[in-house]
Image (cartoon, helix red, strand yellow):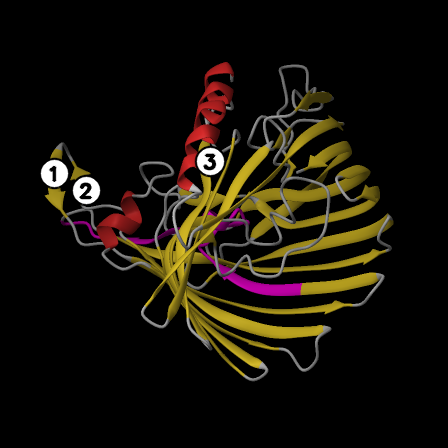
Amino acid sequence: MKRAILLLVCIFPFVSVFSQKKDFTYNFYGFVRGDLFYNSRANVAPVDGNFYMYPLDRDLDANGKDINAVPNGTFYSFTTRLGLDMTGPALGSARTSAKIETDFGGFTPSTTMLRIRQAYVALDWDKTQLLIGQTWHPLSGIMPDILNLSTGAPFNPFNRSPMLRLQYAAGKVKFTAATVWQLQYLSSGPAGATEDYIKNSGIPEIYAGLDYAPSAAWVLGGGAYMISLKPRTVSIMENARYKVNERMTALSAEVHAKYTARNYTFAAKTILASAIDNTALLSGYGISSINSADGRQEYTPFRHSTSWVNLTVGQKWKGGIYAGYTQSLGTDKPLVTGVVYGKGLDIDRLFMVNPSFSYNLPHWKLGVEYSLSNARYGTLELSSGKVKDTHGITNHRILGLMVYFF
């Protein structure tokens, strides 16, 4: 942590020099954030528990006691953030800009190293924008306004990735097309979570969507998404290695809406998700066939219906309610083995409700949020990919938040 802070201190004088360059402007922003939380049991919660998703299933000891039924809680401030927005000289008829954003958190064991959140350049014409670099995944789109760092996951896609994104606005309609690669948010597979599946595929993730704004208050839209992975290039059978050409391709779709008034906002999204566990949703894929000659495998994605709604009221004193629901729909083809790749594939349905309250000043936010989560765990049925014989696991989470913005 000391080294990272020293690095930031060293950067500031250089930025002061760079800011004298003609036609460039720089705007620093960020915040110091502290999260104090308590959970009634163990959970799936990366970033040392800050990125809360859902409760873990019971893990019974020799006496039938649940090892995961142990309360936990702590206080962290490593999600503190620093960002820099820049504008530069025009490139032909295009306006140029760039963003660099970083913090100390991430999906790794280390919370004392800077990591990239966003880093991109953008070219803007009157109706068109071309973005090159890392920013929010197009599926993330409209997000709920809640206090937990997970920002709606595992019901709203949470992902920032390298991409080429083209947006075109014509009147009240905006079209978005993007090709996306993976870096920090990864697909699961035979070798664990790694970007090799998308690298070996040769085909990036592809998104296309439309947004319609009938008035300044409303945004209505939707999009379609494709992911195509190569889970393996080599199979092993009876100590012999075989080169294989395998591919898992899945399609997803989403619809969203948001209404913004002076003192309240309402937002909602529903997704038919297939094999997009790289966006922090319950999702993944399994094996539908195995070739007896060389071990080559075919795959089938798990399908999930995921929806959320969010309402906030007030500005200085703000109250909010958020609810999310995910239902497993199984697989298109029967599974031939219980080996599956993804997140939460032994959960039939997941529900969460988050009431929150915050006090907001120009540079301060103080808030508290309660989260009730219930996951219905069970046994995976190979013939349908659905989860049967379920039992409920519930977690109660209380979050206290302090943010100082600058």
| Residue 393: % across, % down | 71, 37
1 or 3: tag closer to the N-terminus: 3
Q: Quadrant of the C terminus?
A: top right
Q: What element carries label 3?
A: helix
Residue located beneath label 1 in the image = 241
Residue located beneath label 3 in the image = 16
| Residue 15: % across, % down | 44, 36
Asked where in the image residue 142 lies, by quadrant, the reply is bottom right
Magenta highlight on residue 280: yes
Residue type at mark 2 is: Ser
Between residue 45 and residue 140, name the one nearer to us.
Answer: 140
Residue located beneath label 2 in the image = 235
Q: Do the residues labelled 3 and 2 touch (CB within 8 Å)?
A: no
**Residues packed near mark 2 inside 10 Å, few (<14), some (14 to 19) or many (20 plus):** some
Q: In this view, does 71 lie to the left or right of 120?
A: right
Between residue 76 and residue 341, name the one nearer to us.
Answer: 76
User: Residue at point 63% right, 17% down?
Assistant: 61
Residue type at mark 1 is: Arg
| Magenta-highlighted residues | 269-293
Residue type at mark 3 is: Ser
Q: Is residue 258 visible?
A: yes
**Residues packed near mark 1 inside 10 Å, few (<14), some (14 to 19) or many (20 plus):** few
Report the mark closest to the observer, 1 or 3. Answer: 3
**Residues packed near mark 3 inside 10 Å, few (<14), some (14 to 19) or many (20 plus):** few
